[in-house]
């Protein structure tokens, strides 16, 4: 496998939480793989942490195949009617029949709603199952509507945990929330041995999923506090030491239309709740990098004779070292047929649609070779923010901010 020669010692892949929408991130990983770009650090929340486990738990040549296996294992097989529609779609591709019937937003929404209802009532194979006496009483690990223990065997099937814990090959960080303290914490393979339970904890969103007990403490989904691990990668990674390229893959969009009914209100509320911190953290990083550069420029005006007399200047110089940060953000944009249930709509055909969208978005992003360049001389931060926006039902355009 040919690796693209990039001027970055560190390449981060940062994955948001978002349930069934997470196959978009898998599509992005496939696109990076096609271009020979291999992360050295993966960090995730919730479903993003599960994708991290599969990525870090496999050799680069096997990652796409294992991700496909994982997503196929946790998603429903296509229904007979859906299989017929997919067959008919190929038969009538581009025809008026296909445009008027097979690509109908209402039909897609109907099947999506049915798949989401099935997940609520029957759970999701190899992922979670309804508890017979839900929600139960007792410790936080006893109170939930579903049992996530099937996911342990699924992770162990698709992940090599010896490889996950080889932090010299790839750093792995997954975020969770301490139930007792309310504090946001990270399980990191540079600080501990990661097991399946750490990834389960990152994705244990209450009240559906139970808390996971680790070393006497209980943990819920990291999205209870923050749905992106971007700040962890920037701060704990000590960005001043290495030029860094980060791909932030978000599956909730802060931008959206005003809702007109209660279901759109529910969907819009989720979009805002789970996407907003990425923007604020990204802006914070931008300001920190700007301040770093200003202070470093200021130190240039201090005479060497003064600097040599106070060790504080040497410490400042180390902290303000002008290493560069390239931030590329991809944000999944919903289809009109998706509703408030999109994060628990685990149908096979929708999974494929999300995956393909991620693959197309990252390939479109990388078609601009400048996005991988170091920030220009005199700058230490650059960002590329790509959005998919719909002009019509069947035409997608891109915009860069």
Image: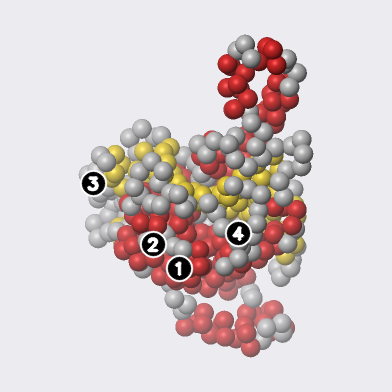
Quarter of the rendering occupied by the N terminus: bottom right
Nearer the observer, 203 or 371: 371
Residue designated by label 1: 66
Residue designated by label 4: 37
Disc 3 crowd, CA 10 A, few/some/many (<14, 14-19, 20+)? few
From the top left corner, tell me how far across and down residue 243 is, in percent: 63, 42
Q: Is mark 2 on a helix, strand or loop?
A: loop
Q: Classify 81 as above or below 292.
A: below
Residue designated by label 3: 137
Q: Marks 4 and 2, how far apart in space? A: 21 Å
Is mark 2 in CB contact (under 8 Å) with mark 1?
Answer: yes
Say whether residue 109 is visible: no
Image coloring type: secondary structure
Residue designated by label 2: 159
From the top left corner, tell me how far across and down residue 28 is, in percent: 59, 61
Question: Which residue sits at x=29%, y=59%?
Answer: 149
Question: Which residue sits at x=33%, y=35%?
Answer: 180
Q: Classify 148 as above or below 93.
A: above
């Amino acid at each position: 496998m040919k690796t693209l020669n990039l001027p970055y010692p560190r390449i981060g892949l940062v994955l948001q939480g978002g349930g069934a929408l997470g196959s978009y991130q898998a599509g992005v990983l496939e696109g990076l793989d096609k271009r020979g770009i291999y992360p050295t650090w993966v960090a995730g929340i919730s479903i993003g942490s599960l994708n991290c486990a599969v990525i870090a738990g496999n050799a680069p040549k096997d990652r796409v195949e294992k991700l496909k296996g994982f997503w196929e294992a946790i998603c429903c097989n296509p229904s007979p009617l859906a299989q017929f529609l997919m067959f008919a779609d190929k038969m009538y591709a581009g025809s008026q029949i296909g445009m008027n019937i097979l690509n109908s937003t209402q039909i897609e929404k109907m099947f999506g709603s049915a798949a989401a209802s099935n997940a609520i009532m029957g759970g999701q194979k190899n992922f979670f199952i309804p508890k017979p006496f839900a929600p139960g009483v007792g410790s936080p690990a006893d109170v939930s509507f579903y049992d996530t223990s099937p996911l342990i065997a699924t992770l162990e099937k698709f992940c090599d945990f010896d490889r996950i814990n080889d932090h010299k090959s790839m750093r792995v960080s997954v975020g969770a929330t301490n139930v007792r303290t309310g504090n946001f914490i990270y399980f990191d393979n540079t600080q501990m041995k990661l097991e399946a339970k750490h990834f389960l904890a990152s994705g244990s969103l209450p009240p559906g999923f139970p808390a996971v007990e680790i070393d006497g403490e209980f943990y819920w989904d990291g999205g209870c506090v923050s749905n992106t691990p971007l700040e962890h990668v920037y701060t704990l990674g000590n960005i001043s030491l290495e030029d860094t390229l980060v791909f932030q893959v978000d599956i909730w969009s802060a931008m959206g239309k005003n809702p007109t009914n209660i279901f759109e209100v529910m969907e819009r509320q989720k979009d805002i709740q789970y996407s907003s911190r990425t923007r604020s953290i990204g802006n914070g990083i931008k300001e920190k990098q700007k301040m770093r550069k200003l202070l470093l420029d200021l130190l240039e005006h201090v005479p060497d004779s003064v600097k040599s007399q106070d060790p504080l200047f040497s410490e400042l110089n180390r902290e303000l070292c002008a290493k560069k940060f390239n931030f590329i953000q991809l944000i999944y944009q919903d289809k009109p047929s998706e509703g408030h249930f999109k994060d628990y709509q685990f149908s096979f055909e929708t999974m494929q649609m999300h995956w393909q969208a991620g693959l197309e978005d990252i390939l479109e992003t990388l078609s601009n070779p400048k996005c991988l360049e170091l920030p220009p001389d005199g700058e230490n931060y650059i960002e590329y923010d790509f959005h998919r926006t719909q002009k019509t039902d069947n035409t997608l355009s891109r915009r860069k901010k």
